[in-house]
């Protein structure tokens, strides 16, 4: 188990300005500092075997509602990617109030997203990596803070800067989004190549998927990024069928993840990822396949293409459907 040391601020030269002083600089000076930091980190960061620079892949993982397994997928996809020696992977917990990615990995890191955001202009490659906690799987974690009053200390501009630095450092970034779809979550989704929308085969979840897809279609650049992932397939005998789910949301299912409550509960309670605690389980293999599809695998092998279809969403609002039929 990781040591339970108290959190503290990133160590910097006391002669340098504090985070609040950085914020008080004029915008052009700060942006010059940020650009310099990104260039400095980029010169030291990940590259391919032949020495060429490597672009960073950004994933955002969102839930149709709380409790559908968003964090478990974020953690385990991240660990599956991090197990490969050519990858450097960072997981950022954007649920600043109630995030628990650190619990899944049995660690309480010393530094948080707030610390990095407030010191973004003075970080170099080594200090940035030391600001994240490295798990035995190879995954780096940047979590929320314990104090609930700190949730407002990271702004969308802060997150833009942090994403820029992390992309210059890691080959893969994974954002575990909050349940509230805040401005920070929107920033992460807009920065991502793929946005996983995790759901289960029940009425409340699928209704929320429809609502979220309708809202996301209104945000520039998001519509074509959404990948619907159905988690815990086989959880209940009375689950809505996959065919009905596709018809309802008007979009094909990108990946199905089987239910295995016993295995997931065991690894979660022990604070280890699936690739370490249950490497041969069918659930683990499905997570690895999902990681392959998103980051380097043949996406044509997913359950279906991601082209949106025609939604039968009115089936969830019979009264409205009836009213429209009379119109």
Image (cartoon, rainbow, N blue to C red):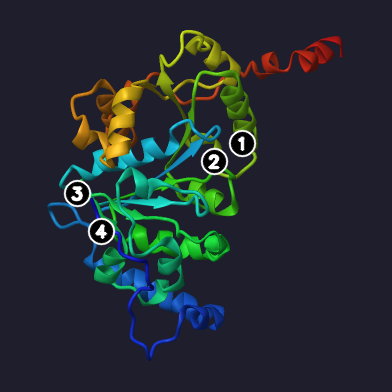
Residue 24, percent from left and from top? 56, 82
Q: Which is more toward the observer, 81 or 261?
A: 261
Q: Which is more toward the observer, 309 or 282?
A: 282
Tell me which label, 2 or 3, sits earlier in the chain: 3
Residue 238, percent from left and from top? 51, 9
Residue 292, percent from left and from top? 28, 32
Decide: is 65 above or below 182: above
What residue is shown with label 3? 136
Q: CA distance from mark 2 to mark 1?
A: 6 Å
Q: Residues within 10 Å of mark 2 (few under 14, many from 20)?
A: many
Q: Of discs 4 and 3, which sits in the foreground? A: 4
What residue is shown with label 4? 3
Tell me which label, 2 or 4, sits earlier in the chain: 4
Q: Residues within 10 Å of mark 4 (few under 14, many from 20)?
A: few
What residue is shown with label 1? 217
Assess whether mark 4 and mark 2 are in contact (beta carbons under 8 angstroms): no
Q: Of discs 1 and 4, which sits in the foreground? A: 4
Q: How many marks?
A: 4
Q: Please identify the quadrant where the C terminus is shown.
A: top right
Tell me which label, 1 or 3, sits earlier in the chain: 3
């Amino acid at each position: 188990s990781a040591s339970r040391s108290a959190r503290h601020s990133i160590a910097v030269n006391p002669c340098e300005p504090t985070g609040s002083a950085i914020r008080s600089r004029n915008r052009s000076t700060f942006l010059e500092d940020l650009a310099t930091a990104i260039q400095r980190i980029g010169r030291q960061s990940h590259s391919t075997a032949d020495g060429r620079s490597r672009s960073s892949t950004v994933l955002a993982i969102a839930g149709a509602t709380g409790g559908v397994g968003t964090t478990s997928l974020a953690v385990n996809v991240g660990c599956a990617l991090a197990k490969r020696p050519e990858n450097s992977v960072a997981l950022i917990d954007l649920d600043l109030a109630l995030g628990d990615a650190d619990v899944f990995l049995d660690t309480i890191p010393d530094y948080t997203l707030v610390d990095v955001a407030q010191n973004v202009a003075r970080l170099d490659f080594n200090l940035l990596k030391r600001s994240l906690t490295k798990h035995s799987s190879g995954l780096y974690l940047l979590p929320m803070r314990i104090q609930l009053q700190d949730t407002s200390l990271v702004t969308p501009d802060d997150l833009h800067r942090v994403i820029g630095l992390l992309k210059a450092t890691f080959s893969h970034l994974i954002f575990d989004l909050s349940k509230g779809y805040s401005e920070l979550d929107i920033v992460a989704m807009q920065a991502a190549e793929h946005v996983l929308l995790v759901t289960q085969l029940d009425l409340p979840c699928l209704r929320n998927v429809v609502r979220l897809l309708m809202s996301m279609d209104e945000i520039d650049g998001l519509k074509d990024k959404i990948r619907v992932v159905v988690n815990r397939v086989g959880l209940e005998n009375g689950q809505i069928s996959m065919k009905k789910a596709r018809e309802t949301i008007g979009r094909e299912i990108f990946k199905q993840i089987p239910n295995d409550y016993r295995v997931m509960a065991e690894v979660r309670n022990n604070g280890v990822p699936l690739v370490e605690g249950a490497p041969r389980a069918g659930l683990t293999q499905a997570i690895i396949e999902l990681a392959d599809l998103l980051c380097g695998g043949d996406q044509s092998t997913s359950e279906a293409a991601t082209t949106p279809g025609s939604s039968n969403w009115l089936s969830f609002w019979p009264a409205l459907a009836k009213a429209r039929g009379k119109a």
